[in-house]
Image (cartoon, coloured by chain):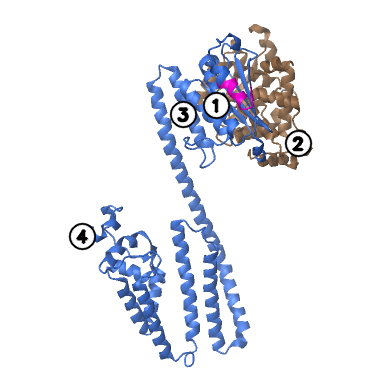
Amino acid sequence: MSSEDAQQDATARPGGGRTVRVVLVDDHRMFRTGVQAEIGETARTGVEVVGEAADVDQAVTVITATRPEVVLLDVHLPGGGGVEVLRRCAALSADAERPVRFLALSVSDAAEDVIGVIRGGARGYVTKTITGTDLVDAIFRVADGDAVFSPRLAGFVLDAFASTDAPPVDEDLDRLTQREREVLRLIARGYAYKEIAKQLFISVKTVESHVSAVLRKLQLSNRHELTRWAAARRLV
Amino acid sequence: MTTAPPRAEPGYAPAPDPDDPPVRKLYRSADGRLLGGVARGLAGHLGLPVSWVRIVFVALFMADGMGALLYAAFWFFVPLGIGGVEHRQPAAGDGGKRRRLARKPDKGQVFALIALLIGASVIASRFQLGQANGYLWPVLLIGAGVALVWRQADNSRRAQWLELGRRKALLPVLRGAAGVLLVCIGVTGIVVLQGSVRHLGSVLQAALAVVVGIALLAGPYLVRMMQDLSEERLMRIRAQERAEVAAHVHDSVLHTLTLIQRNADDPREVARLARAQERELRAWLYKPEGRGKDEDEEPTTLAEAVRKAAAEVEDHHGVPIEVVVVGDCPLDEPLGAQMQAAREAMVNAAKYGGEGGAVQVFAEVEGRSVFVSVRDRGPGFDLDAVPADRMGVRESIIGRMERNGGTARLRPAPDGGTVVELEMERAAAEQGT
């Protein structure tokens, strides 16, 4: 985020914001064109689309070459799907200096797709029905290191954590706090982060940190545990 | 089948003509058979009464067991059939006045059995039971065992067609075991009669060694063949599934797309069509097998009820409704009332608040209570400003909830719009789920 291009562009746009460099990964050319048209107007939105890819191999190449801040990642891709892209770019997203962050953007809101890419390391999940403004908002949020959930995703997470007869596996994991659950519930009810902040009398930053905590807890400590966790709730 | 006697009409009624004529293939009869259904099948094929064929077989049996060999050969090589034989059966039986009865042995069968017994006793007397020819009993035992096992194989095949294999799982096993036992006893009998009991151990060892050797040699091929077979079956099932999906997608999606093209200048209608199609496709793709694929049945659980209500309101008012359901529970009476209240709230939201965007519905089952919220992004709503004679909200939402022991709250949403929150305790009896 502290990249030079961001600072260069800072004065070019009203609002004094910065520019986020984005790569679009989707196998439907029409959809890429649509998204490009909706958010690609850098002067207005602050989003600069620096690359596009249609399958896993292309995506890895483009992402490595351009080093964007955010990748809009389709879940269903030829060559292994979004999860495979996440796996092969793990080194890039773990980079402390200029991390590449992934925002899953999918037409599917099936539980296994959602949980799959979140487990793979995506920092958010929005469905393709999202409006252009909300998408831009989500991109900036992810670029800042926060997590973005769609209402459906919040519903899945609540469903998974709220089950009262949880198997013993869960006991050593930290469960969601009351506040985190409240935040998730409001997301599931379709509230924007700003609205949640107003409703709970907390700042937007606090809401975001709650959501990030949920994401951290969702990823659990190791893959093995997560597999069992997800299987126990029939999410995978 | 225009030449069929009029008596046979009812039997033919369901089958259209073109089915019948060309190739009359020989099948063994699966219905009303005594042993392998060979005689019955032959009779059907040749158009003779069954008893005649049976008598011929028994007579041939007298001639040094020729009939038995012939019968066994037929049994071995001729496949078992239902349809083909069924069709010809009445024609064959109609010459006489016999009607086929399902299970009860009819006159012909009794007669055949008696003839068989007589024939057996004749043979037995000829061989002077058990003295001159010691091999007779073991051979008979082996024959009976083989017949039992073969017939069992036929039965299991038939059960596959009729899909009643699961009903009595024990009986077939018992029958198979009995057959194997009979054969074993027979073989042992022959060995004993030969007076080579001393060698029994070594013979058994040698036999075992040969069997193991053959198994070792043929095993890999057999296993491979089985795997190939099951793989092929899997592929076929997949192909079928794919064809079904393709057919469904073709029908409903192309239909909707056509409608959308026609209504291209009416954005509301287009949106409505697209949403309805999306919902249907999702239900079809993601719902578990056999559940909710056709939407007609009444919902029995909360989640289904919420989704159904939302889908109906969405179709009716053309406003997208996003539904998130957390948890699920069976629907009881108070919850039914809550669903109706929620539906009313959705209708209101769609009617008056639908301009601002999608209506959001959230339902959660949380321990003992069920919470439903309906939120729109419309211009907002003030309950006190509504004239006292308008009962929509007061009666069908608030009143209904309170009558059933729940609560309803209406309040403005933070950024414009209205939230309706409905809360209801579940009946105590439902706690187990």
- Tell me the quarter of the image containing the N terminus of chain B: bottom left
The residue wearing badge 1 is: B340
Q: How many marks?
A: 4
Q: What element carries label 3?
A: helix
Chain identifier of the residue bearing label 4 in the image: B
Chain identifier of the residue bearing label 3 in the image: B
The residue wearing badge 2 is: A221
Q: Is residue B210 above or below residue A72?
A: below
Q: Are marks 3 and 1 in contact (CB under 8 Å)?
A: no
The residue wearing badge 3 is: B277
Query: Of label 3 and label 1, which has the lower sequence position?
Result: 3
- A100 vs A66, nearest the viewer: A100
Residue type indicated by callout 3: Gln
* Magenta segment main secondary structure: helix
Q: Is residue A92 above or below residue B420?
A: below
Region in magenta: B396-407
Q: Is residue A186 magenta?
A: no
Viewed as shown, does residue B320 lie left or right of B66? right
Place of residue A82 in the rendered image (x, y in percent of width and height, measured from the top left): 60, 32
Chain that the image shows in brown = A
Q: How far apart are marks 3 and 4 (CA)?
A: 54 Å
Q: Do the residues labelled 2 and 1 touch (CB within 8 Å)?
A: no
Query: Of label 4 and label 1, which has the lower sequence position?
Result: 4
Place of residue B73 in the rendered image (x, y in percent of width and height, measured from the top left): 39, 73
Place of residue B58 in the rendered image (x, y in percent of width and height, measured from the top left): 35, 79
The residue wearing badge 4 is: B3
Q: Is mark 1 on a helix, strand or loop?
A: helix
Chain B as rendered: colour = blue
- B410 vs A129, nearest the viewer: B410
Check if mark 3 and mark 4 are on a common chain: yes
Q: Distance between the residues labelled 2 and 1?
A: 44 Å
Q: What element carries label 4?
A: loop
